[in-house]
Image (spheres, helix red, strand yellow):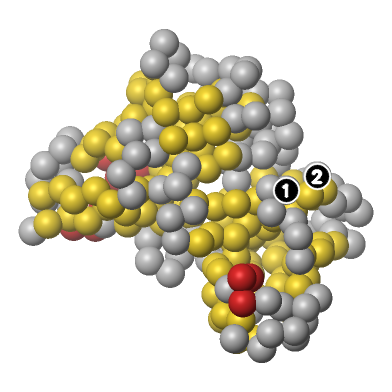
Amino acid sequence: NAGVTQTPKFRVLKTGQSMTLLCAQDMNHEYMYWYRQDPGMGLRLIHYSVGEGTTAKGEVPDGYNVSRLKKQNFLLGLESAAPSQTSVYFCASSSGSSNQPQHFGDGTRLSIL
Amino acid sequence: AQSVTQLGSHVSVSEGALVLLRCNYSSSVPPYLFWYVQYPNQGLQLLLKYTSAATLVKGINGFEAEFKKSETSFHLTKPSAHMRDAAEYFCAVSEAKGNNRLAFGKGNQVVVIP
């Protein structure tokens, strides 16, 4: 009963380093999303995908790239990490119908020094 | 574009007292509305949703919310707070016939006082 799985759970990077966050879902969902959560800001959408091979920009896309090569996976990349990208990152998936909820992973805590 | 307002970042409630979290939304088309709960170091979990059926929606853990179109509100209530209700609560809105993008409020951190 995995649902949405995010790896890694924690990571510390130095400024300028790159890394990729992996999200995997086993619910055969079409739509997948990446959010960041910062204190007092709620969740803000970074990028999303409406199907395999597609990606689109969300509210705060700068400094991030994404790829959806397989339906079950959605990757979030940071090419050159900056301290402002210190945050908790959440992946979510949904069937794509607006009346259906999004299902969330447990998050990745990322610190950029 | 849709948006959500949640007032009061921190809400303190005594154990056994009423929990009331306010959510007002803005949407140019009929909305779908959701309440999520986030326990420490976890992801968001769906509490309940409004999808244009009954205006009073019952969710998990004894929570319920009422959709009021005239007030553009979807307030969350629970008659009697329990210690396990200490968590952060988010209201979110999506547009019917939209692309399932959610707009989240900034959240309410609920503290339950014994």
What's the chain of the residue with tag 1?
A
Which label lies toward us, 2 or 1? Answer: 1
Disc 2: CA contacts within 10 A as few (<14), some (14-19) or many (>=20): many
The label shown at residue B11 is none
Which residue is painted at 52% across and 43% down in the image?
Answer: B104
Viewer-proximal residue, A108 or B72? B72
Q: Which residue is mark 2?
A: A50
Residue A109 position in % (x across, y down) = 55, 75
Residue B50 position in % (x across, y down) = 48, 27
Q: Which residue is mark 1?
A: A58
Q: How far, Cα to Cα, is label 2 from label 1?
A: 12 Å
Residue type, mark 2 in image: Val
Q: Is residue A36 left or right of residue B83?
A: right
Residue B69 position in % (x across, y down) = 44, 14
Residue A13 in sight in this render: yes
* Secondary structure under the numbered disc 1 in the rendered image: loop
Residue type, mark 1 in image: Gly
